[in-house]
Structure formats: structure tokens, C-alpha cells
Image: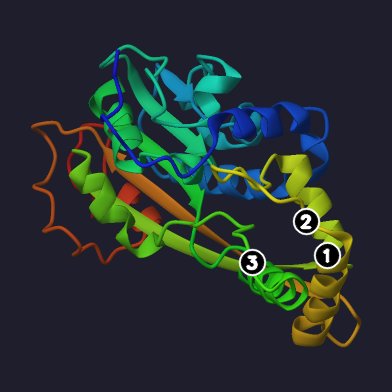
């Protein structure tokens, strides 16, 4: 089985992440719209690849959404029943321990909105690469740097104003524009990335926070966590309204999804482009591959 790289910096507390996901299991269906958006992207990619996948694996923290979306797609007949191996702990912190897949056993691995919690993202990607059969496909989505930028700003400003100092409340997210480079360093061929930035409008910041809890996406940064006081939260809500509220009083919330795709190397593939030179969209790059691995028109 694949093992992680040694000594990654500890950014996230795995026990907290597991607790957040466990608490969210009952509420997740009420706030699964972001995961469904990520699943839609993955399924759209599968629709343009005219090949069969006989050993697909879902390593998402909330497995099952992919299979639900795929069931309504014409690609469903080309993808076998999707396995979700391992435990909640395995899915909570990618790269933390042994990947629950033997090396070279999967021909499709999907991870929807889980990799932004990896303490060792390069190590997690390398594990997936080793789990794939030659010419196997990896598709993933993770939150990018612009996610929750409004909430991050007002929480920091409110805590500085009320307490005279601020603690990090929102996780650091990856820069999506280096996604292809990360895949290439992990040994993937033909790596591509798309960045999907969009705005969701909420009635107020508390409604946003309720959804984040329901998804299991609240703060799990390592180290001591000072509870968010009512005074700081109230001031943050005031600042959010002052800085960002729209004419109808609703607040905009930015999300950024980084969509990644890469192939386990195979002799039939085109030679990978120079690192950082990917210019094509994810859908175009995937559409360019036929079942035999050759390039399309």
C-alpha cells in the first residue's frame, strides 16, 4: 500500500477534522450543493471520455454524491459500481496514513472537496498516483484561495477590533493556478486544471456558518483554538453587512473550486508538456483522449 511522505508540517488537526465530519453526517444532505457542483464537473469530464472504467474509487470525504450525479448521466453505463474504501478517518485527512487502495488497483480515482484538508498535499497526490493502474485517471476538486474571502476579512477585522489580536479562523486554501504543477510533481501525465470561481448569496453570515457546519467545513487548524465570542461574531456580522451587503440585504460569499485531472503514465500517451505550460481547459484536454489513449481531433 502507499505510504505518506515523512515529516509534513501539521497545519490541520486530524481529530478535529474527523469530529467535524462525523457531526456533519446527519446534516450534510441539507448543504450538499457545493459537493454536487464538484460532482457535476467530474461527471462532465467522464462524459467526454469514451472509455470504460472497471475499478473506480471515490475517496471523497462525503462519498456517494458522485454516484448519485453519475446515475443521471449517459456515462453511467461506462463506469462500474464506485467503491468508497477505507474509513471516515482515511477520507478526513488525505495523505495522513496508508491509502486504502493497493498500488495499481484502480483505473479511476475521484476526490471531491477533500484535498484542501491535506497536511501533505504532494504526498496525498503521490499516493493516488501509485494506486492507479497505468493510464488510469484521477479527477479531483478542492477549494481554492479565494474561498470565503469576505468572511475571512471581516472575522479578522472584528477580532482585531474587539480583542486587539486575531486568530486564524479560515483555513489557508491552495493556489489553484499551480494545480497542474502539483500533479506533474506527483508523477501524473497530461495534468490539467480549471479554476471555477462563483458567488453564493446568503440571508446573513449565520446562515453561511450553518451550511459550513453542515458540510463539516469549519475550522480544524492545529493548535489551541480560542472560542469565537458573541461580541466578535456580532461585530463581524455588522462589518459583513457594511462591506458587502447587496441592496436586498443579502450577502455574497465567494467560493473557488480548483478542478484537477491527470493520468497515470502509459506508453500510449502523448509526451507531457513542460511544467506550468498547460493552457487548455479540463474538458478540452479530457476530450482529446480516445479509449486507446491516442489524441482526438
Q: Which residue is mark 3?
A: 166
Image quarter where the N terminus lies is top left
Q: Nearer the viewer, residue 107 or 295?
A: 107
Q: Do residues under tags 3 and 1 come within 8 Å of each other at their CB atoms?
A: no
Q: List x then y, in percent, for residue 243.
A: 75, 85
Q: Which residue is mark 1?
A: 233
Q: List x then y, in percent, for residue 189.
A: 19, 42
Earlier-in-chain disc, 2 versus 1: 2
Q: List x then y, in percent, for residue 224.
A: 61, 44
Instruction: Please give the name of the residue rendered at 44% of the width and 31% of the height, measured from the top-left corner.
Output: 94
Q: CA distance from mark 3 to mark 2?
A: 10 Å
Q: Would residue 102 appear left or right of 87 to someone viewing this image?
A: left
Q: Which mark is residue 228?
A: 2
Measured along the vertical axis of the image, is residue 175 above or below residue 75?
Answer: below
Image quarter where the C terminus lies is bottom left
Q: Would residue 236 appear left or right of 78 to someone viewing this image?
A: right
Earlier-in-chain disc, 3 versus 2: 3
The answer to which quarter of the image holds residue 53 is top left
Q: Do residues under tags 2 and 1 come within 8 Å of each other at their CB atoms?
A: yes
Instruction: Please give the name of the residue rendered at 43% of the width and 57% of the height, measured from the top-left corner.
Output: 174
Secondary structure beneath dot 1 equals helix
Measured along the vertical axis of the image, is residue 261 above or below residue 252?
Answer: above
Can residue 62 be spotted in the picture? no
Q: Which mark is residue 70?
A: none
Q: CA distance from mark 3 to mark 1?
A: 13 Å
Q: List x then y, in percent, for residue 184.
A: 20, 47
Instruction: Please give the name of the residue rendered at 64% of the width and 57% of the height, measured from the top-left corner.
Output: 169
Earlier-in-chain disc, 3 versus 1: 3
Can residue 93 be spotted in the picture? yes
Amino acid at each position: 500500500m502507499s505510504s505518506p511522505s515523512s515529516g509534513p508540517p501539521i497545519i490541520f488537526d486530524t481529530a478535529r477534522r474527523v469530529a467535524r465530519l462525523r457531526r456533519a453526517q446527519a446534516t450534510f444532505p441539507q448543504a450538499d450543493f457545493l459537493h454536487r457542483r464538484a460532482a457535476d464537473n467530474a461527471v462532465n469530464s467522464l462524459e467526454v471520455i469514451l472509455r470504460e472504467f472497471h475499478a473506480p474509487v471515490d475517496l471523497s470525504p462525503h462519498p456517494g454524491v458522485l454516484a448519485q450525479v453519475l446515475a443521471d448521466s449517459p456515462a453511467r453505463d461506462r463506469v462500474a459500481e464506485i467503491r468508497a474504501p477505507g474509513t471516515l478517518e482515511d477520507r478526513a485527512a488525505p495523505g495522513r496514513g496508508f491509502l486504502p487502495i493497493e498500488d495499481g488497483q484502480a483505473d479511476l480515482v475521484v476526490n471531491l472537496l477533500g484535498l484542501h484538508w491535506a497536511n501533505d498535499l504532494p504526498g496525498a497526490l503521490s499516493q493516488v498516483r501509485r494506486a492507479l493502474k497505468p493510464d488510469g485517471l484521477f479527477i479531483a476538486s478542492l477549494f481554492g484561495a479565494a474561498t470565503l474571502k469576505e468572511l475571512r476579512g471581516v472575522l479578522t477585522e472584528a477580532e482585531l477590533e474587539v480583542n486587539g489580536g486575531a486568530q486564524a479562523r479560515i483555513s489557508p486554501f491552495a493556489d489553484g493556478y499551480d494545480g497542474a504543477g502539483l500533479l506533474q510533481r506527483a508523477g501524473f501525465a497530461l495534468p490539467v486544471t480549471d479554476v471555477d470561481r462563483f458567488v453564493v448569496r446568503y440571508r446573513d453570515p449565520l446562515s453561511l456558518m450553518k451550511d459550513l457546519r453542515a458540510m463539516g467545513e469549519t475550522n480544524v487548524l492545529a493548535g489551541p483554538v480560542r472560542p469565537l465570542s458573541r461580541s466578535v461574531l456580532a461585530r463581524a456580522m455588522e462589518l459583513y453587512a457594511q462591506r458587502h451587503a447587496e441592496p436586498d440585504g443579502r450577502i455574497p460569499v465567494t467560493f473557488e473550486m480548483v478542478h484537477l485531472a491527470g493520468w497515470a503514465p502509459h506508453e500510449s500517451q502523448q509526451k507531457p508538456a513542460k511544467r506550468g505550460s498547460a493552457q487548455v481547459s479540463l474538458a478540452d484536454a479530457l476530450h482529446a483522449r480516445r479509449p486507446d489513449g491516442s489524441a482526438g481531433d
